[in-house]
Each structure stands twice: as structure tokens, then as C-alpha cells.
Amino acid sequence: MTRVPMTKVGAAALQEELQLLKTVKRPQVIQAIAEARAHGDLKENAEYHAAKEQQSFIEGRIKEIESKISSAQIIDVTQLPNNGKVVFGVTVQLINVATDEVIVYQIVGDDEADVKVAKISVSSPIARALIGKQVGDEVSVQAPNGAIEYEIAEVQYI
């Protein structure tokens, strides 16, 4: 089985969602199905069909999360030796060489990635260019409108 890297925070968020689905959402939908059944004829009962559809979605999501957790390789970057190298889980401060713009990204697993909160996937072009590099190195990242040069200003193991 292929192990998928995931941060400790990402794994905790999945565990929390799984707990919510199993202890809150699943019982709610079971109750909704029971109430809809009590209304009689199931063929024309929209509430029943909506509840069954919701149940199917919840059960699918539970299976998906359990699968992700079982194949996850949870990495706690705070436990790694800080040698200044860019590895999975670190927070990297980059300087755009052309514009002097400073950007900060955390390199996370595919399921945790969210550019709006500065979390990029380990399989993204930027992260792939950064992995293995260290403070002071310059990297070139292919973007849709050409290559962008970045200098690694800081690597934080937080």
C-alpha cells in the first residue's frame, strides 16, 4: 500500500470530521429516514429519498476518510531536526527575485492543500522545486506565464 504524507494537523482535522460524521451526522440522517418512513408511501416521499441520498453521501465520506487515514504517513515536522532544508511539512518564506515580493507557504499533503491559507500540496510545482533545497538557494518554478525565480529566505519547522 502506498503511504501518503500528511501533517499532524491534517490528520487531526480528518479524525475530527470522521468523529462528527459518525456521532452526529449519521444518527441525524437515520432519524430523518425513520421520520420519513412514518409518513407512509415511500415511492412519492421526497423527504425519504433526500434522507437516503444524504445517508449515502455520509457513508461514502466516512469510508473515504477512513481510507485516507489508514494510508497516511503522519509527519510531525516539529520532531524533525531543523537543518534548514525544505522537507514535507515545513513553512517556507520565499522572495520573488524579480519583484522582491515575499510569500510564505506551508508544504502539506494533497488533501490539506488550500492556497487561500498558504498551504500548498507537496505534489505542486512550487513544492517539488523547493524540496531538498535550503536557505539561500534559488529555485525556478514553471508558471503558466513563464518561469518565476524565488530565493528561499527562511525555513521553519513549525
Image (tube, rainbow, N blue to C red):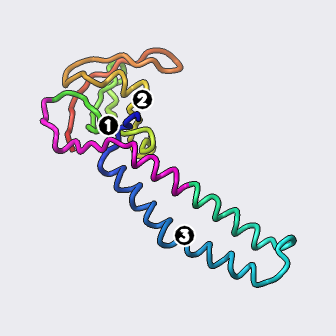
Instruction: Report the residue that reaches farthest toward the front.
Output: 1
Residue 155 percent location from the top left of the image: 21, 33
Residue at x 51%, y 57% (from the top left corner): 62
**Which of pointers 1 and 3 indicates the residue nearer the eye?**
3
Q: Does the magenta stretch include residue 107?
A: no
Label 3, secondary structure: give it.
Answer: helix
Residue 156: image x %, image y %? 20, 38
Alpha carbon separation for disc pair 1 and 3? 36 Å
Q: Mark 1 points at which residue?
A: 104
Return the x and y of residue 59 as percentages of the image width and height: 58, 59
Q: Nearer the viewer, residue 96 or 118?
A: 118
User: What residue is rendered at 42% in x and 29% in y?
Assistant: 123
Q: In this view, does 18 lie to the left or right of 44?
A: left
Q: Mark 3 points at which residue?
A: 25
Residue drawn at point x = 39 percent, y = 39 percent: 109
Q: Earlier in the sequence, mark 3 or mark 2?
A: 3
Amino acid found under the numbered disc labelled 3: Lys
Which marked residue is nearer to the observer: mark 3 or mark 2? Answer: 3
Label 1 packing within 10 angstroms: few (<14), some (14-19), many (20+): some
x and y percentages locating residue 48 in the rendered image: 75, 72
Pointer 3 local density, CA inside 10 Å: few below 14, some 14–19, many at least 20: some
Placement of 39 over or under 140, stated as above or below: below
Determine whether label 1 and label 2 are within 8 Å by CB. no
Is the residue 80 above or below the residue 8 in the image? above
Q: Give the range drawn in magenta.
A: 61-83
Q: Does the magenta stretch include residue 72?
A: yes
- Judged from the image, the secondary structure of the residue bearing numbered disc 2 is loop
Which of the numbered marks, if any, corresponds to residue 62? none
Q: Distance between the residues labelled 1 and 2?
A: 17 Å
Residue indicated by mark 2:
123
Residue found at x 65% / y 60%: 56
